[in-house]
Image (cartoon, grey):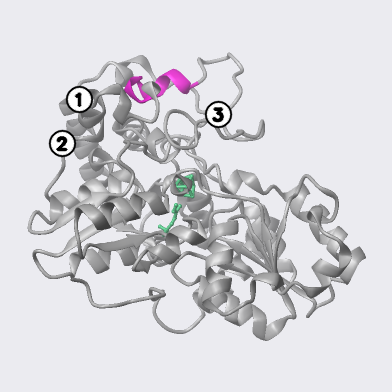
Amino acid sequence: MATTSSIDARIKAAPAAELCSSELTWDPWVYDAPPDTPRLPIYGAGASQWDVTPASAPVQTEIPERYRGMSAPEIERRIAVAKATLGSRLVILGHHYQRDEVIRWADFRGDSFKLSQQAAGRGEADFIVFCGVHFMAESADILASDHQRVILPNLAAGCSMADMADEAQVLSCWKQLGGAIGVGPSAVIPVTYMNSSAALKAFCGERGGVVCTSSNAARVLEWAFERGERVLFFPDEHLGRNTGVKLGVPDDEMVLWDPRRRLGGHPVDALRRARLILWRGWCSVHARFTVAQIERARSEYPGINVIVHPECRRDVVEAADLDGSTELILETISSAPPGSRWAVGTEINMVNRLAAEHPDKVIFCLDPVICPCSTMYRIHPGYLAWVLEALVEGQVLNEIVVADRVKAAARVALDRMLSLPGRAGQPVTARAPR
Ligand code: 13P
Ligand code: SF4
């Protein structure tokens, strides 16, 4: 695999103005709690660092000093030895946003949908080490066999968007909707984005609802509209709105539910008229992309293809040529002809890697500033070495365990998604790349 100079090296070499935060130059463990010292959770440096971290978010305790002081080649050697020792007992799954030094160890890479299929299909491995974020590891635990143990190398690798909807808020919304418009079996179908806690997936499973990912949101919403008059979609308002637009839901039939306001901030009439009730939540990585960036890319590179993730705002998705999941972005650019040019609206680690792997194409991130997803970025190779070496010694660290009752109901919602026929997803406005 071709690699870029590591994200760390790029960060160290970049002038301050090209970093979204000077904290990106800090060691990742500065955010961890010293043993026996309580510490509030924090996302860490990067795009979500200024988002509000719920007090209930997991906190990572400092890993042993020897890993913090280790050189990169020594960490690499230790990971290689531990992985080889564990052999087929271990499977490492890696999301596309992981840094190069971590993703290179993944047996399977993918978007949330593909990785959930991998987690469901690797029954022979005893240990699933998930190099991604908390909700992905939870989904793996829900889909894995009983004997499999799922490990997240850094417990603080959450998702700031997933944290924008908690169970209490969604239960309150459901109750309020029930009072205002009724939530009988076909009145409102709850749909949760994969980027949500297991508790919210269970909420959907118990109420005739379903999970979706960015690769199948349109198909899942169609499924939901076939079963109910309205959809309550959480926690990403942008994916929900972009998908509603693709399905032709008129603007005045989409409302934004603000969990901090009574009835989400709407009169009962507006809720009755709504077909799509969107939750006020967003991804701070994708909120950075703007139409002005797209205009600049088009003026500097006439004829360039612009491809973005559907977590971007509606105006950005509409100004782009294509939108889709990380896997779709990867497949589209990888299969494009040599010489084609791509401005990409998604996380920097993935875009840098695509650029390094396809030197025959022009590929760059729409955002000129280096700003990784702060939670994905918490998975540094030191944490991977730590959990793998512990497994070799017979110790399971950082295990993600979803309670049985939650697991069963969440599985219903995930299985509804996984059983939908066809391929994972199609771009909205596909056209031949130039
Ligand atoms: P994908 O399913 O497209 O990989 O998206 C997951 C994610 O968290 C994007 O921000
Ligand atoms: Fe969550 Fe955004 Fe990071 Fe994806 S990129 S894991 S949505 S914070």
The numbered mark, 2 or 1, whose residue comes first in the sequence reads 2
Kindly identify which residue carries mark 2. Answer: 5
Helix, strand or loop status at disc 3: loop
Kindly identify which residue carries mark 1. Answer: 13
Kindly identify which residue carries mark 3. Answer: 59
The numbered mark, 2 or 3, whose residue comes first in the sequence reads 2
Q: In 3D space, how far apart are the residues under numbered discs 1 and 3 (Cα atoms)?
A: 30 Å
The amino acid beneath tag 2 is Ser
Helix, strand or loop status at disc 2: loop
Residue 272 lies, in percent from the top left, at 83, 72
The answer to whether one can see residue 121 in this image is yes
Name the residue: 55% across, 29% down.
59
Helix, strand or loop status at disc 1: helix
Query: Dots 1 and 3: beta carbons under 8 Å?
Result: no
Q: Nearer the viewer, mark 2 or mark 1?
A: 1
Between residue 74 and residue 214, name the one nearer to us.
214
Query: Dots 2 and 1: beta carbons under 8 Å?
Result: yes
